[in-house]
Amino acid sequence: MINLTRNIWPFRSAQKGGLSQCTDDALYEIAEKASSLNDPCNIEEESYLLWVMGRLMMLDEVASPNEELFQVHPQGSGVRVYRKRVGTVEFCFLMFEPDGFIPYHDHSDCNGVMRVLKGEVTTRNYDLLEQTLEGMVLQPSAQAWMTAGRMASLSRHRDNVHQVTAGPDGALVLDVFTLFSHSAGCRYMKVTSSECWSGLAQGQLISGEGSA
Ligand SMILES: [Fe+2]
């Protein structure tokens, strides 16, 4: 169930030299673009996400931070993270050990673009249909196997709940989150799905809010 409009394969060959500067330029351009957003409607948000994916796709390679800068991911298993906040954008590098994973969580009041830099991950996404005192009603929306170079996005209204699991060789992933309020962030949850993947699922929050 891969929606090709949300996943772009960059058919570009690798080049050497100046990678750090190129990466910095791209990330700051994205932050600058995000600063001009003001609570966009659905269509504008999707256009913005495609622009971010296009900007990342222009990078033959993404320079990643030194390993010693990564810290243990508070909710993941076998995952380390490095975060850099620029304006309303958080750039989040995730280093997965083999079969490491980040459990189900949403991205409240923010959207995101994921690019796999090394290895492979599988993702499973839900749309949040309704939130009640009893919990969340979730609609399965996408699942994908992503190798290095693949990208995917989620918006405030689409695919906003997901889990990410690395393959047997681990993975390095860059997430670019655009935050629309001071309270934007992740909420981790237990998801109880029906036997059929296409059926509705229930989400129960298991901890407080955290960083995107
Ligand atoms: Fe996420």
Image: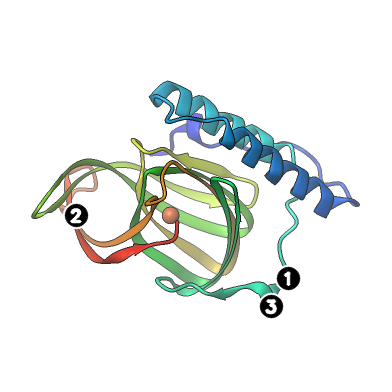
Using the rendered image of the protein, determine whether residue 40 is visible from the camera's viewpoint: yes
Single out the residue that lies furthest toward the left: 134
Quick check: can you spot residue 10? no
| The quadrant where residue 190 appears | bottom left
Query: Residue flagged by tag 2: what amino acid is it?
Result: Ser
Dot placed on the residue nearer the N-terminal end, 3 or 2? 3
Tell me, for residue 193, which label it has, or none: 2
Amino acid of disc 1: Asn
User: Of marks 2 and 1, which one's residue comes earlier in the chain?
Assistant: 1
Label 3 amino acid? Glu
Residue drawn at point x = 51 percent, y = 42 percent: 152
Up-down: is 131 above or below 48? below
Q: Is residue 189 above or below residue 177?
A: below
Q: Marks 3 and 1: in contact by CB < 8 Å?
A: yes
When the figure is inspected, residue 27 is found, relative to residue 78, above or below; the finding is above
Seen in the image, is 31 located left or right of residue 19? left
Q: Under tag 2, what secondary structure? A: loop
Q: Is residue 172 left or right of residue 43?
A: right
Q: Nearer the viewer, mark 3 or mark 2?
A: 3
Q: CA distance from mark 3 to mark 2?
A: 38 Å
Query: Where does label 1 land, which residue?
Result: 66
